[in-house]
């Protein structure tokens, strides 16, 4: 039981670490884009990608 608990704690710590890295990256991109999550042409590019697919 103790081993399972340790493995779970290790996985949760790793998950938290990766999630924090993703959030920090997204926040950095958000700041670089002056408070916009997506660029102005994001929808247009997505439509083109869907047409190609």
Image (cartoon, grey):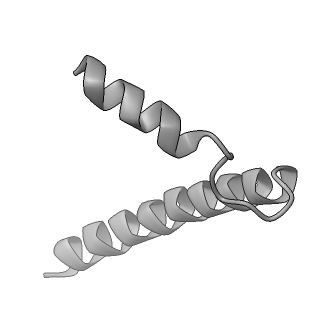
Picture quarter containing residue 34? bottom right
Q: Is residue 1 above or below residue 41?
A: below
Indicate left or right for 1 with 35 as reference. Answer: left
Q: Is residue 35 above or below residue 9?
A: above
Q: Is residue 21 above or below residue 46?
A: below
User: What is the x, y in percent for residue 33?
Assistant: 81, 51
Residue shown at the point (22%, 21%) measured from the top left: 53
Q: Nearest the camera: 4 or 24?
A: 24
Picture quarter containing residue 46? top left
Q: Nearest the camera: 23 or 41?
A: 41
Q: Nearest the camera: 44 or 35?
A: 44
Indicate left or right for 32 with 18 as reference. Answer: right
User: What is the x, y in percent for residue 21?
Assistant: 62, 55
User: What is the x, y in percent for residue 49?
Assistant: 36, 26
Quarter of the figure with the N terminus: bottom left
Q: Is residue 38 above or below residue 45?
A: below
Residue shown at the point (45%, 60%) measured from the top left: 14
Residue shown at the point (62%, 63%) measured from the top left: 23
User: What is the x, y in percent for residue 35?
Assistant: 80, 65
């Amino acid at each position: 039981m103790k081993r399972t608990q340790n493995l779970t704690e290790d996985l949760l710590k790793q998950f938290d670490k990766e999630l924090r890295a993703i959030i920090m990256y997204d926040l950095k991109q958000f700041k670089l884009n002056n408070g916009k999550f997506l660029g102005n042409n994001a929808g247009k590019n997505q439509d083109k990608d869907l047409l190609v697919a």
